[in-house]
Amino acid sequence: MPADRINNPFAPVASPESIPGGKLVQGREEIVVAVQELTRKFGQFTAVDGINFTIKRGEIIGFLGPNGAGKTTTIKMLTGLLRPTAGEISILGYDLRRELRQIKKHIGYMSQKFSLYPLLTAEENVEFFAGISGLSTSAIKHKKQELSRLLTPSLLPLKVADLPPGIKQKVALFTCLLTDPEIIFLDEPTSGVDPEMRRNFWSLIYELKTKGKTLLVSTHNLDEAEYADRLLIIHQGKIILDGPLAQLLQQKGASTIEELFKQAIINHETS
Ligand SMILES: Nc1ncnc2c1ncn2[C@@H]1O[C@H](COP(=O)(O)OP(=O)(O)OP(=O)(O)O)[C@@H](O)[C@H]1O
Ligand SMILES: [Mg+2]
C-alpha cells in the first residue's frame, strides 16, 4: 500500500503511476483491505448495511454469518462483481470504484456457486481458466503438472461432476489460485464437505498464509471459527462482532462460539 495510506486507506488516492506495479510497502500492520460504510440495497431491502472493517496483510478472516446475512453480497462487492449502493472499498491502496483493473491483478475469488465446468475434467478446467487468465503455454503446462500431483491418478480422467465434493473444492481453489493472487476471497468453500475434508481444506488455507497470502473465508459453520485469525460476524447486513475468537470470548464472557454468536444476535436484535 502506498506509504501515506497505510494508516488511512481512504486518504486521497495517489495516481496509479505513483504506485509502481501496485507493489506496496511491506509491514506487519499493513492494511490491505479497507471497507467504509459499505451498503448494498436490492430495491427497498438492505442486504449490506453500512459495514466497516479492515484486513491486514497475512490475516485469515473468518467471515461468519447465518444464511442471508450478507456474506456473498459483501464478497461480490469486494471483488467488483456487484456495485455498492454506497460506501468505499480500498484494496492494496487502490480505490475499487476507479481502479478495479489494478485490483483484479491481485485478487482471487472462489464463488459460493460452483464455478467449474462439470462436464470437463479437472485438467480441462485448469487449462480453460489458465487460458482465459492469460497464462503462457509453459505456465499452463506447469500448472497441469501441479494439478496432477494434487489429485490421485484415478481421479484425473473423471469429469468434475463425478469427483467427490471435497476434491471438487480443492480443484476450485486450485483454479482460483492460478494467477497467484495476494488476496483471496473464498465464499463458503467448505459447504457440503464432510468435517475431515473441511479440516483438510483449512490446512490448504494455512499453507497459503505461510506464503504470505491474505484470505477472507466465509462460512456459516460456527465450528470453523477457531481456524481463523480473526472473525467478522455479520447478521442482517451488519457486522456485529469483529476480533480474534479468544479475545471476543473473553470480552463478552462467553465460553463457546455458539454462546458468543447467540448473545451477539440477541444484543443486535434488541438494541
Ligand atoms: N440479487 C438479489 N436481489 C434481491 N435480493 C438479494 C439478491 N442477492 C441477495 N439478496 C438478498 O440479500 C440478503 C443477503 O444475501 P447473501 O447472499 O449476501 O447472504 P449470505 O450471507 O451469503 O447467505 P448464504 O449463507 O445463504 O449464502 C438475502 O436476504 C438475499 O435474499
Ligand atoms: Mg452466500
Image (spheres, grey):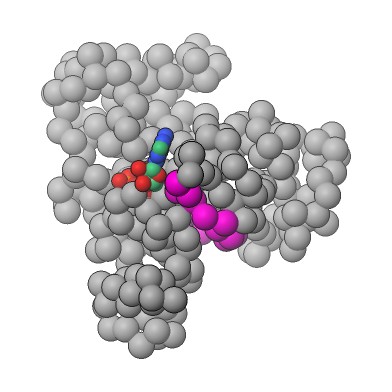
Residue 173, percent from left and from top: 36, 36
Total labels: the figure holds 0
In the rendered image, the residue lying farthest to the front is: 44
Where does the image place residue 223, in percent across and percent down from the top left?
25, 63
**Predominant secondary structure, magenta span:** strand
Judge by depth and name the residue closer to the eye, 32 or 252: 252
Please tell me whether residue 52 belongs to the stretch shown in magenta.
yes
Decide if residue 37 is on the left or right side of residue 126: right
Position of residue 48 relative to residue 159, above or below, is below
Q: Quadrant of residue 79?
A: top right
Residue at left offset 56%, top offset 49%: 39
Q: Is residue 168 above or below residue 158?
A: below
Residue that appears at 15% across and 48% down: 194
* Residue 96 appears in view: yes
Which residue occupies 35% across, 58% down? 65
Q: Which region of the structure is painted magenta?
A: 45-61
Report the front residue among 84 and 78: 84
Percent x, y of residue 254? 32, 83
The answer to whether residue 217 of the structure is visible from this angle is no
